[in-house]
Image: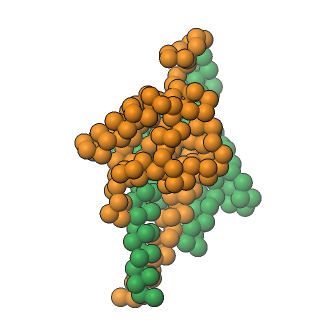
Chain colours: A orange, B green
Amino acid sequence: AQLALEQDYERFREYETRYRVLLETSREALALIEADNGRVRDLNPAAERLLGVAGGGLDGSALSSEFEDRSRDAFAVAANRAVETGEPQSVAVRTRRGFRALTVDAQLFRAGGEALLLCRLFPEEAPGGTSTEFG
Amino acid sequence: AQLALEQDYERFREYETRYRVLLETSREALALIEADNGRVRDLNPAAERLLGVAGGGLDGSALSSEFEDRSRDAFAVAANRAVETGEPQSVAVRTRRGFRALTVDAQLFRAGGEALLLCRLFPEEAPGGTSTEFG
């Protein structure tokens, strides 16, 4: 049993590496947050660029602390709905730094007895040639 | 030591779930292949759509078997270079089913003593309004 456990251990270590490589190299802006308090577990480089934060700067703080005031409530409503319904939720927000318009898709999943939200951040499409402000 | 191992085990099981969620929900088309023989370990739904294959159909066969003849050599050269240099390589290929023009970015990483290539597949950009054939 001990040997089997150690073999599984190696296998699962491999998945941590796979997870890290996928996250770090993704062109999609991704944030993994705790479902109950919104704290950031992982934020990839693409998401750091969209939010205008330096590398690793958000670990442990709430993702919504990077949104401007009114966006925080909208995000909290969507996140709660994602947790309650289990259905992906989409919400428009604005970043605190840079005041940039984003869409955030939040999807619940459970891993190791813990509820997490995978959030994908998309810059709002600029309508052809016009301003994106409140677009 | 046994208890510590079991706690780690739980932690790494969580990473397998995180990896799966990231892979399955990604809008990027992703394939994880074995570096030494090109066999597909994981192919996400976005990649299945680009290649025109049904779910799970590629497990264990070579990714390049989904490319048309001349593309197979080009892909093999790029994959070998990615392994030898450790630098990401980009190559233009055409799919066997659908004859679709793609760019494949291949990046080497090592996990659990094994060499793997993470491949991202992008449809070739259609030049404004014209045909994409040999674009």
The answer to whether residue A54 is left or right of residue A74 is right
Residue A41 point in image, percent of width and height = 49, 54
The residue at the point 50 percent across, 70 percent down is A13
* Residue at (60, 11) in percent of width and height: A129
**Total numbered circles:** 0
Residue farthest toward the left in the current orientation of the protein: A85
Residue B123 drawn at (x, y percent): 55, 34
Q: Quadrant of residue A87?
A: top left
Frontmost residue, B33 versus A114: A114
Q: Is residue A26 above or below residue B125?
A: below
Nearer to the camera, A121 or B84? A121
Q: Is residue A60 left or right of residue A76?
A: right
Whether residue B103 is visible: no
Image coordinates for residue A77, horizontal then vertical, percent: 34, 36
Residue at the image position 44 percent from the left and 69 percent from the top: B12
Q: Quadrant of residue A76?
A: top left
Which residue is nearer to you in this view: A127 or B113? Answer: A127
Quarter of the view holding residue B132? top right
Which quarter of the rendering shows the N terminus of chain A?
bottom left
Q: Furthest residue to the front? A: A69
Asked if one can make out residue A116 in the rendered structure from this viewpoint, the answer is: yes
In front here: A132 or B23? A132
Indicate the position of residue A63 as horizontal and vertical percent values.
49, 44
Residue positioned 43% across, 69% down in the render: B11
